[in-house]
Image: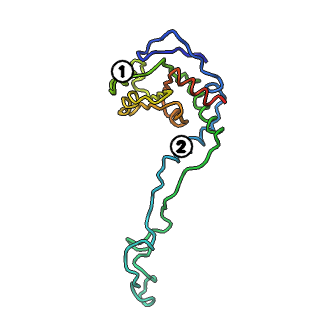
């Protein structure tokens, strides 16, 4: 698939880049995408939820009233889950939600997501993206020049660029990552995928195996 290369002003440079079929033209595997997105979201969970059980509640263990003759149910402690302020039965406990996926499956999921974007013509290739200073206005101008003002954009750079990253950080619909940080969730969550020519080469080297 051949795509025209634009500059940060949104104008064609006259150059074209070939998006490799081995990365941007595979037959998408929806189940691989599902598993990779599920793992990504699971890894975002802290898993620090916790409620106190009856052995962790502060309170007396004195028997509240005699066993029989009250007409009510037996009660051994104020910390019983049946009472207000008592411990909780089967409450949430800290746990790790992460799980393992094979590298080949994760690679297939990323290629599938990129192929979907290519089929939908939602990939924009830029020659280079670099700002002289950290200003949100710089990134806003970039998005406006590409006519993507109301689109969710994901900009993929070959290496870390703090000026570009910090300029985009305050914008809700913009995200900047490096090629080695690319994940299936971010690709699918973005409306338009912005790639630099060097990022395309980096992705090809990483995924076209």
Left or right: where does residue 99 sit relative to residue 7?
A: right
Q: Secondary structure at mark 2?
A: helix
Viewport quadrant of the C terminus: top right
Residue 87 x, y percent position in the rendering = 43, 70
Front residue of 164 and 148: 164
Q: Are marks 2 and 1 in contact (CB under 8 Å)?
A: no
Does residue 31 appear in the picture of this structure? no
Counting residues from the start of the chain, the first of labels 2 and 1 encountered is: 2
Picture quarter with the N terminus: top right
Q: Can you give x and y, in whole percent of width and height, for residue 195 in the image?
A: 51, 24
In screen coordinates, is 83 left or right of 186?
A: left
Instruction: Determine whether 2 is above or below 23 in the image.
Output: above
User: Can see residue 144?
Assistant: yes
Distance (Cα) linking label 2 and label 1: 31 Å
The label on residue 51 is none
Residue at position x 38%, y 71% in the image: 85
Q: Which residue is under mark 2?
A: 40
Name the spot of residue 191 as percent of width and height, x first. Answer: 48, 28
- The answer to whether 152 appears left or right of 16 in the picture is left
Which residue carries the number 1 mark? 141
**Up/down of 182 relative to 200, above or below:** below
Tell me the quarter of the picture where residue 71 sits: bottom left
Structure colour scheme: rainbow
Residue 96 horizontal/vertical position (percent): 53, 54
Q: The residue tagged with tag 1: helix, strand or loop?
A: helix
């Amino acid at each position: 698939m051949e795509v025209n290369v634009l500059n940060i002003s949104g104008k064609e440079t006259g150059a074209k880049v070939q998006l490799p079929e081995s990365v941007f033209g595979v037959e998408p595997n929806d189940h691989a995408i599902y598993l990779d997105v599920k793992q990504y979201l699971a890894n975002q969970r802290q898993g620090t939820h916790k409620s106190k059980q009856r052995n962790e509640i502060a309170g007396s263990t004195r028997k509240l009233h005699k066993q029989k003759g009250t007409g009510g149910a037996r009660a051994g402690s104020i910390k019983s889950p049946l009472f207000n302020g008592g411990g909780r039965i089967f409450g949430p406990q800290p746990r790790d939600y992460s799980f393992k996926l094979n590298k080949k499956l994760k690679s297939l999921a990323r290629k599938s997501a990129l192929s979907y974007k290519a089929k939908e013509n939602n990939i924009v290739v830029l020659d280079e993206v670099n700002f002289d200073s950290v200003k949100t206005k710089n990134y806003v101008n970039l998005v406006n020049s590409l006519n993507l003002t109301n689109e969710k954009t994901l900009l993929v750079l070959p290496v870390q660029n703090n000026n570009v990253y910090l300029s985009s950080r305050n914008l809700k619909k913009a995200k900047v990552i490096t090629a080695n940080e690319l994940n299936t969730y971010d690709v699918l969550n973005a409306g338009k995928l912005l790639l630099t020519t060097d990022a395309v080469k980096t992705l090809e080297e990483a995924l076209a195996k």
